[in-house]
Image (spheres, grey):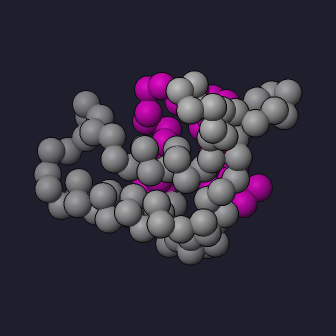
């Protein structure tokens, strides 16, 4: 499935969300790459899983649009949903974007 990774996340008032430190728009790619690279407490501590997430993060980082498999989309959504500092505003928008809604 083709996904536009440059989609900007927005507030409930439809204003672009921005990073606190650089005052840049938060885009889907940032959220996906971060979720793939962060090691969470309940992650398996095996190299194969880590290397797979790294490879997917590298693939996404260099693209503006990605053609993702069902498995890749599932992994990205699972990772975003597990991130403790991503609340419903972020997770809901990212899931909709990843489902092309």
Number of marks: 0
x and y percentages locating residue 69 in the rendered image: 50, 72
Quadrant into which the N terminus falls? bottom right
- Give the main secondary structure of the magenta stretch: helix
Q: Which of 67 and 24 is in front in this view?
A: 24
Q: In this view, does 73 lie to the left or right of 99?
A: left
Q: Is residue 48 above or below residue 89?
A: below
Image side of residue 77 versus residue 1, left or right: left
Which residues, given as a range, are shown in magenta? 74-101
Instruction: Judge whether residue 97 is colored magenta.
Output: yes
Extreme-right residue of the structure: 13
Quadrant housing residue 5 = bottom right
Q: Horizontal and vertical percent for residue 34?
A: 43, 44
Q: In this view, does 88 lie to the left or right of 101?
A: left
Task: Please state, as top left, top right, bottom left or bottom right, where the C terminus lies in the image.
Answer: bottom right
In this rendering, is residue 60 above or below 83? Answer: below
Q: Is residue 31 visible in this depiction of the protein? A: yes
């Amino acid at each position: 499935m083709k996904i536009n990774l440059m989609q900007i996340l927005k507030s409930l008032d439809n204003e672009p969300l921005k990073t606190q430190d650089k005052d840049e728009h938060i885009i889907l790619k940032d959220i996906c790459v971060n979720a793939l690279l962060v090691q969470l407490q309940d992650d398996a501590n095996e190299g194969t899983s880590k290397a797979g997430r790294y490879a997917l993060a590298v693939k996404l980082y260099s693209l503006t649009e990605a053609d993702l498999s069902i498995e890749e989309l599932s992994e990205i959504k699972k990772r975003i949903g597990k991130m403790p500092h991503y609340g419903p505003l972020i997770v809901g928008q990212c899931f909709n974007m990843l489902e092309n809604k």
